[in-house]
Image: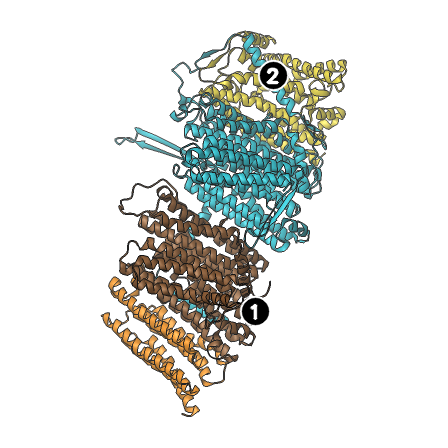
Amino acid sequence: MTPTFETATTLALYTPAAAPFLASLIALILPWRAAAIAGILAATAILASGITLAADTQPSTYAAGLLRADALTAWMLIAIGAVAAIACSAAPAHLRTESTAERRRYLVLAQLFLTCMSLAVLADNLGLLWVAVEATTIVTAFLVGHRRTRASVEAAWKYVVLCSVGIAIAFLGTVCVYAASIAAGGHGITALDWTHLNASASTLDPGLMRLATGLVLLGFGTKAGLAPMHSWLPDAHSQAPAPVSALMSGVLLSVAFYAILRYKTITDAVLGPTYTRTLLLIAALASLAVAATLLIAQRNYKRLLAYSSIEHMGLIALGTAFGVKIAIAAALLHILGHGLTKAVAFCAAGHIMQTTGSPDIDNVHGLAARQPALAATFGISLISLLGLPPFSLFASELAIARAGFDAGHGWAVAIAFTLILVAFAAIARHATAMLLGPPPPPSPRPNSPSPRPAGLTILAVGLAAAAALGVYLGPLEQLLDAAATIVAGGPR
Amino acid sequence: MSDGLSAQLLNLCCGLFLLTAVGVLWRRQVSSLITLLTVQGLMLTGIATLLAAQHRNAEAVGIAIGIGALKAAIIPWMLRRVHNQVPDARETRPLVNVSASLLAAAGLTLLAYAAARPLVALAPSASAHATPVGIAVVLLGFFLAATRQRAISQIIGVLLIDNGIAAVAFLATGGVPLIVELGVSADLALAVLVLQILTSRLHETFGPTDLDELRELHD
Amino acid sequence: MTELMAWLIAAAQALLLALLAPVVMGVTKTVRARLEGRASGRVGQPWRDLRKLLRKPPTSPTDSGIFFTAAPPMLMATSLIVAATAPFITTVGVAGSADLIVVVGVLLLGTVALTLAGLDTGTAFGGMGSSREMTIAALVEPTLLLSVFALSARVGSTNLGAIVNAGNADPEAVFTPASLLAFAALAIATLAETARIPVDNPSTHLELTMVHEAMILEYSGRDLALIEWASAMRLTILLGLLANLFAPWGIATTISLAWVVAGAGFFIVKVLGLAAVLAAGEVFVAKLRLFRVPELLAGSFALALLAVLASYVLA
Amino acid sequence: MTDPTATALVTALVSAASGATAGLSLPASWRARVVGTLLFLSGVAGLLAGLAALSGHDWQTDLPDLLPLAGIKLAVDGLSGWFLLLIGAVTATVGVYTIGYAGRDGHGPGSRTAMFTLPLFTASMLLVPAAASVPTFLLCWELMAVTSLLLVMTEHRRHEQVRPASVWYAAMTQAGFVTVLIGLVWLASIAGLDFTAIRTTTPGVSPAVKGGVFLLCLFGFASKAGAVPLHPWLPRAHAEAPSHVSALMSAAMVKLGVYGLLRVGFDLLGGGTGWWWLTVAALGALSALYGIVQAVVATDLKRLLAFSTSENIGLVLLGVGFAGMFASSGQPAVAALALAAALLHTINHAGFKTLLFLGAGSVVNATGTRDLDQLGGLSKRMAATTALFAAGALAAAALPPGNGFVSEWLLLQSLLHPGGHTGTVLALGAPVAVAIIALTAGVGVATYVKAVGTGFLARPRSSAAAGAHESPLSMIAAMAMAALACAALAIVPALSVPAITQVAASLRLQAPPMGTNLVSLHLTGITATFWPLWLTVGLVVAVGALAVAGRTVGKARRRAIAWDCGDGPLTARMEYTATSYAEPLQRIFDDTLAPERDLDVTHEEESAYHIDAIRYRQRIPDRIENRLYRPLIVAIARLGEAARRLAPGVMHRYLAYMLTALIVVLVAGVIR
């Protein structure tokens, strides 16, 4: 390998974590507009480094110290970069009405949030992965409580307590894995390295790994929003400022699920796939059931989007549970598609909140007549979330269904798609209540700022990307295939 | 320090460690809860130092003292400061009465021992045999958090869980590698800081931190 | 040559029916009057009414449109076509080639033209008559088609000529229970189609009871003549079909002139006989309430269904 | 790409795509014209593709890298050719109609979204028959669903009923899609993704699995076709959608449900067993009867036409059901005849239903109301629309010179074919089916006489109807195109025999026993012939002769006021309206319709004996919807309310969930 190529990839290995960290420092000193632009640049840096890591063909790793990047990491970095780009570029529109101190705090914390997520994805050591995921909770705690209303403080409180408890269980699981790795002859820091564990999987103690898997699935499942550990998600995502909930719903849940994917490769090697399959299947169907039933009588459109995130994370867990290569590829594609669309949906919901002033579905009437561009963006993002073509969620849901039947779990697919149907009907009813109908009388709110066209074009670009993904993957095809082989293991 | 003595000391510390957890469930006053938490912190430091001494590894001793300072000194200080802002001392009415809590504690400890069997079977050393205590404390901490209304008791529940996990980490592996240990304690400190700030902000917005008022966010 | 001959016979048959229809109406009126003990007009009276009406100018209501003026010619056209193609005198060539379903459809087309005309007048009577007529026509249709099913199941085709030939070939096949049930069903359906007594009273103008008369209330002059004439032809057609399907003897099965004339003679006798029987029947039966008519038609539907089942079980 | 089918289909898709971009970009005044013409071109190209496919030019292509993780595979054979022809023809007619109908103002049907989605809707409908693998079929199916949903919502600003209609439509279409997805993916997991692979491996698949797959697909396709128990979306969506969209949905989209049934039932699963097709026939019979009974009492013109679509689909399903039963009980000739009747009825229905919906559209465009009780007197104000609508009604009522009668005659012949019935099921089923078809035909005639009579004739019953004016030329031209198509199908139906033979071949059935002599419709197996051409000529000549004779020989016609019993001028209120017209039939079908009547009498304040006002309101509900769907919706709503207690906002409940989950996981770890 020529040295220049070597430095480019090692550079690409560091930038995802370094760039946003640098941006957060800038945010401390420079005025907020410059800091916002720095944030956008940091996000695009993550995306760029994700693409460069993906570009190098063989799935070998670059273990410069603790960091490591293989095809799966590259895919996750692309997801983080894309969603971050949308969220950061939508942030200035939402910060217009806030004081400079709040703006500064928001930008610093947001960039730290990106740093932690990039670290989590790049970490080879599972302990470091846990630390990074826990750090995201702390950083976002203040972001959720950003608006200092009674509701947002309550949401932040519940968010921190529930997530810390959940993550603590994950740490207990990590400790058990560490203990098993030590007993199998590992020592010091490398005992928890994913590569080491993957290699020496056969020597790990099965009983302990059974306990560890259960705890890890439960712990990271909390951060991934899987039922029954999902209760924090609707409160946190509905109270956080729109770009933050876009980031959290779009990609934080998937980063937590990425951790479960990493552990799944190890446990499948030790125990065989049945244990993780049953746990994931139960979690997936529970999430779909909770999301579907709670969407029926939903009254707040941000909580509606939050429950839709739980539904889609349930679908991703379902795909992973089936375990065949095409199911994992579908789950990964679903992660990217859902991230993009949910980010656009939350940002649009933020604009709707600004124009109508109320989060309740009943107070929003005839939006399509009043704000056609905003209503179109929100409507199309909902169409994509409902799994309708030409968006990528349709392609991944179809692939998950096919994989389910191939893996002999037809009944699970049938139950899952019936629940998705209930959710579909509920979301359709709420969305049409908000969007359709004659324009309401001119609202008494004098300064309801309609969203600037610049804000909406970014969202439109996000939707276009999701649609493009649904039709033609192009270069991402091999990356997706390589990433799926890592998790599914073996050519199947 | 002969091996027999250190093994006995270790068992003593673990015994007290579990006892304090049960005591937390037993007592009603928040101030006594905080003292029990401090004692538990000390016991945890004891376990850490004993294990470090057994392995004659200076670095581990340093970690143990650091954790000791954190869990036995800084955190109780913060909790007392928050507690003083709140006038009422007694815990009003826990959701599950005390006798039921203790029965549940016994059941959870039994479950912890059963679940920790693979950990125990891992190594014949005395410390490995004590790991179920850690898991028991985790479950008790969880139970406390799930059945008490006071915000302070929530924090104590979370801290109990962290103590339990740290105990499991030390006993099962003789201390988690340095960088992870540092990460854990950093997170722990930050978690407490955040909880502390939030409770103070809760005071401004909600008044006495009776968690039952926190019902506005529902479906 | 036989092609032209067939067309000529068909035309002759149509002409015969056209001339015979008013006479059939005359016969029914005289038989009915005689049985009720009152003096009746001459049998040729309908012809004289037609000649009088044909000379008078037609009037149409102010708001009626094309549908009102087009209905009489359409009604007459449908009657003429069925008269030309159904096997009354002979079953050979064009005259016997009609398909039973097509015949039922064409007659229904005539009724539809009349109902639309009723609506086009814009009067309450026209609407009422057309609504009732359509209700009855909707319920008669299943009976007609099911009795067609019963007849065609035995023979293997719905072509009228084939059915009549089959009846002609082995006479005892006509007396099977399936045939008798089909005859009863078809008889009731005929009464409903041609607005005879149990379903509708042809001679009344009392708006509570009239169905057919209400639709043609606004007609006068040559329009009324055409309608009266066409209605008479429909009665003759249906009686002729009843006669030939269930008593096919005497119908000409070859092209030869002698057979055709004999066939026509037999046909006239059979139709006038049936007309007399119909008139006699009407004397002893009272008109049903409109909402009792569906029960009558349901009865005839049941008869038709039994006919079909019988044609399977027994045939 | 020298294959004619491929070039035609590609031109159709390309012109639809350019129509969509034009719809999005052009200014309002030009939008309708350009999109209309491009739609017309796309329709004609689709028509040619269908014709090419029907004349034997089968074509297929494979695009593996589109649609991630699945790939797209297209193939056109006889069966898809028939439906391409049908959809192409309807699209062309609607294209011409849109030029006039979509207006200049850029709102409602002329809005940017509507003009963008309309070509995409027709393009996706053209793609559904061309799909040749399970993922492609499901993709095109859902594309059609999305675009049609957006089109149903076009006029959401003007009518508030559009919102519930679109929710019903979205939910039921998605329910149908989910069942089809589960059925086809289940089949694909056993027999492979491509239709060719499925065809070869299905003989080996166990009958239980094939039965399960067929029932699932039947649910989905029957709901798309609007068969009765699954029909509630149809009258709502068609009544609220703009008329050119209802025409597309009713004439073309609904037929793709039948296409799906034929493709899965006959082609992929190889015909299957008798009970499959008995269910299809039973569904058909129920749809036919219930559809027409609801249609006859409907006072909303477009709701009447929508229920009549349910009825005609019922007849098609009857034909398909009996074709399947005959085929599986070893009578290929009659099976082919029944299939021919069903196929001919799909294209006949497409013809006259397009004409009727476009007519209804021009009426709504002119008067602004769909309520038959408010209309009347349009024959003078909108002579062309009235004449064309009457021609469509004649065909729809299955009266002889119309094309509806031709396919109904064929269907009856296939059922009446005596001696062919071996099994008792067929022996009993055939006469019952004939009875049902007959009753449906009878009530159908009453429906369309009511629609034409009360809607168009006599005096206008409202100021809106009085102020009606004739529609623009392009709308009349479109209706004339549809009328011409109906006339051609009525007079020379034998044209379609070679095409039907090609379709039967691609479904592995025998050629239908029908002569190809253009003048007559001759059935070779049984001696039954019918000369539509001579019948029409005879009627025209007879009517013409009598009318001319009357005018030349007799005296001139006079105008006079109608008989008003002598007491003053007749007002429009005395006319029979749609409700009063259907009142006898409603009374006869009272127990199936169960109309809701409420009567409130308001008395004077002083005394109870003096009545101030009496208000009578009658509404005819859809009983199947109330009996089947209302309880389901109430149950789901109650489930939603109950589920809200899952997230009460209390921290302890959430922690309790997590604690139980932890305990469960630990216990799972303990017991092996």
Q: Is residue D500 left or right of residue B44?
A: right
Residue A364 visible at all? yes
Residue C120: x percent and y percent? 48, 20
Residue at 43% over, 91% down: B4
Chain letter, colour orange in render? B
Pointer 2 residue? D542
Residue A300: x percent and y percent? 36, 52
Q: Quadrant of residue C151?
A: top right
Chain letter, colour cyan in render? D
Q: Is residue D370 left or right of residue D527?
A: left
Q: Quadrant of residue C102?
A: top right
Pointer 1 residue? A272
Q: Amino acid at mark 2?
A: Ala
Instruction: Read off the chain for label 1.
Output: A
Q: Is residue A354 above or below residue D583?
A: below
Dot 1 surroundings within 10 Å: few (below 14), some, or many (20 or more)?
A: few
Residue C170: x percent and y percent? 76, 26
The colour applied to the residues of chain A in this rendering is brown
Q: In front: C235, or D69?
A: D69
Q: Is residue D58 above or below residue C164?
A: below
Query: Which image quadrant: the N terminus of chain A?
Result: bottom right
Q: Are marks 2 and 1 on the same chain?
A: no
Q: Amino acid at mark 1?
A: Gly
Residue at 58% over, 37% down: D46
Chain letter, colour yellow in render? C
Query: Which image quadrant: the C terminus of chain A?
Result: bottom right
Q: Is residue A469 left or right of residue A20?
A: right
Dot 2 surroundings within 10 Å: few (below 14), some, or many (20 or more)?
A: some
